[in-house]
Amino acid sequence: MARKKIALIGGGQIGGTLAHLMAQRELGEIVLFDIAEDMPRGKVLDIIEASPIERFDVGLKGSSSFEDIRGADLAVVTAGLARKPGMSRDDLLTVNAKVITSVAENIREYAPNAFVILLTNPLDAMVTLCRKVTGFPRNRIMGMAGVLDSARFAAFIALELGVSVRDVHALVLGGHGDDMVPLVRFANVGGVPASFLLEQKYGPVKAREVMETLVTRTRQAGGEIVGLMKGSAFVSPAAAALTMAEAILLDRKRILPVCALLEGEYGVSGYFVGVPCVIGGGGIERIIELDLTPEERAMFEESVSHVKSLVDGLDL
């Protein structure tokens, strides 16, 4: 049986890391594309030279020609300008819109049957633009944000409670921005509510303050890394995209929070917003609509409002 073909569009830090992770798992034949002519070939050669050591065996190609993504089953898009210190995700809107328009046109031409996972910021607007250009059905195009944001929330909870991240489960909805919605009610450690464990540690009043701090840190996590590294995160976004790619390529039927096109769910129509979905061989196979509390609903609607303003800025 022929292996799946994976096109990684954007050979920067995330794209290169993702190529390595996918190669290690032998998920398919990988093409790493970037407009910088020699860089993707160099990164791929580096990964190939690691393969005898790490014992993985897949086809890898670095390219600067969109022709080489022809027939891809999955396209993961990381192309575009990354955040720099002092920038918000929204500041990238205009410049990255030009990049994504070109990328989407080439995916439509060379990989018309591909599933698309998009990571480029501002995420919610860029995946909207990509869908408009490609015309792909909503099950085949999605944005990576919720998996990463939820992982960050879970990591901060684990650090605060001194427990294994393996046992922490968290969920973040809404847009990929400072008004994202970490759902405190759903955060748990081994099935035990995280809020309960915080109350045991600190008492009710202090526990609420600590949880609010964790929520704020989650919302600002990307900026925290940019400030420390003078560049954007790349390992955690690549790992999050890998989780989504595996769910599609291996038909995992994972319940994951992804940026999906809503058509009436959560009272929203025509916009991509982060919500929990069943992800499998059919892409977005089902959108799970949670029964939000009035407070959660208000935060979600505020986040959706921000998504709408970004999309309106594209003048689609």
Image: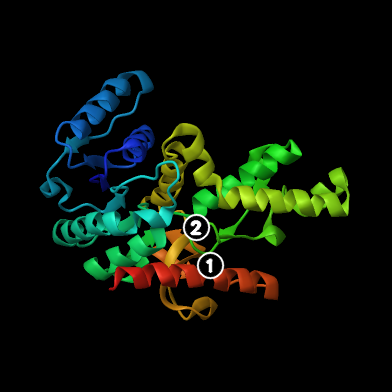
* Spatial CA span between label 1 and label 2: 8 Å
Task: Measuring from the top left, give residue 231's x and y in whole percent.
Answer: 41, 37
Earlier-in-chain disc, 1 versus 2: 2
Task: Measuring from the top left, give residue 9's x and y in whole percent.
Answer: 25, 47
Amino acid type at image mark 2: Gly
Which residue shows up at 34% across the image and 69% down it? 313
Which residue shows up at 32% across the image and 47% down it? 78
Which residue shows up at 14% across the image and 45% down it? 68
Q: Quadrant of the C terminus?
A: bottom left
Depth order, front residue of 190/155: 155
Q: Secondary structure at mark 1?
A: helix
Which residue shows up at 71% across the image and 61% down it? 185
Residue 272 appears anywhere in the view? no
Residue 177, which numbered label?
Answer: 2
Residue 48 figure quarter = top left
Q: Which residue is mark 1?
A: 303
Residue 83, which numbered label?
Answer: none
